[in-house]
Amino acid sequence: MNATLPKILAKGHALDLAENSFGELRRSDDVSHDPAALRRRFAEDGYLYLPGFFNRSDVIEVRRGIAGVFAERGLLDPAHPVEDAVKREGASLAFLSDPRPAVDFMNALSRANPAMLRLLYAGRIIGLFEAFFGEAVRHFDFTWVRTMGPGFGTDPHCDNVYMSRGSPRLCTAWIPYSDITYEIGGLMILEGSHRQADRLRNYLNRDVDHYCENRPEAAKIKSGEIPWKWGGVLSNNPYSLRQHLGGRWLSAEYRMGDLLVFGMTTVHASLDNQSRYFRFSTDTRYQPASEPIDERWIGENPIGHGVAAKRGMIC
Ligand SMILES: O=C(O)CCC(=O)C(=O)O
Ligand SMILES: [Fe+2]
């Protein structure tokens, strides 16, 4: 089957597409109405892949909102319909590599998009998490809106290092607002990685907003001059990381309407975008309402990884 796949790139590396190195995510839509079965799947796989979970028309409405903002900002090629979201030659989103402007941009994109807020924070998805947790659900207020132009995908990481100051049962929901071929590139998960916590302990115990008070750069981190010393990446080479940790990289050609849920210790990354289209998606977080929450992501204007989030340690 893998013989029919096109070249799949991640951080510029062609992934090994042999059957024991790359595969498709296991679908869990067969058990989506059975909370106990969902919990078992999640424990087994470290993720839940629910194709067609949302009404496609609701998702398309969200996409239109994002594409409209991109058109207004001159980021789209005017020779193509806005809804195709083709990147204009030379349009730059380089500012998104700095955490503060990225947080502000994502916040603005989500707050200007009521269809997005409805999809993410009401109705079907809340029902799913209530059933899954077996209690009331609370979500982070911050919405990570990813707008990935042609180029590299996201480096392999676990979400724990960005948001572990609250509930350990926190889950990520990754939702595409494009139909995503392998050429456009969506999320991928490293099979079995949620069971590698022992091997990854040193990594998983870190927090990107911790810094060493007794190191020369401490003053610059405290003042915000250096946003962070370490960006939370586990590896910048998905090909060799897989060789090292084992398991297959699992992904899919996603369709609008799909939902992918995973836990804080599941290693994931995304494929490079080899097309001219923007890839739009969000990732949002849900947890049992009764558990503590990571304050960095709460409120109208969350502090995120800003100065107020930094914690000095002696190391
Ligand atoms: O969409 C991406 O490229 C990365 C998303 C991600 O890291 C996440 O959903 O936690
Ligand atoms: Fe992530």
Image (cartoon, helix red, strand yellow):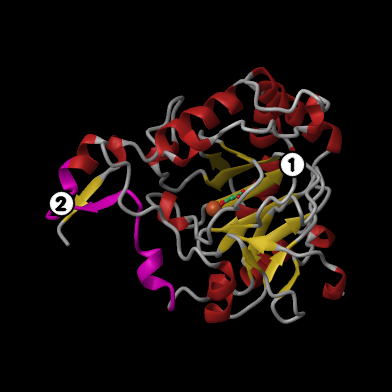
Residue indicated by mark 1: 276
Badge 1 density bin: few <14, some 14–19, many ≥20, Cα 10 Å: some
Outermost front residue: 90
Confirm whether the magenta stretch covers residue 76.
Answer: no
- The residue lying at 43 percent from left, 73 percent from top is 200
Where disc 1 sits, the SS reads loop
Stretch in magenta: 199-219
Give the quarter of the figure containing the C terminus. Answer: bottom left
Q: Nearer the viewer, mark 2 or mark 1?
A: 1
Residue 138: name its quadrant.
Answer: top right
Instruction: Name the kind of residue labelled 1 in the image.
Output: Arg
Check contact, mark 2 vs mark 1: CB within 8 A: no
Is 313 located above or below residue 83 in the figure?
below
Residue 140 pos. (x, y %): 51, 39
Q: Mark 2 points at which residue?
A: 213
Q: Position of residue 54 (x, y in %)?
A: 80, 41
Report helix, strand or loop for mark 2. Answer: loop
Coordinates of residue 105 in the picture (x, y in percent): 52, 28
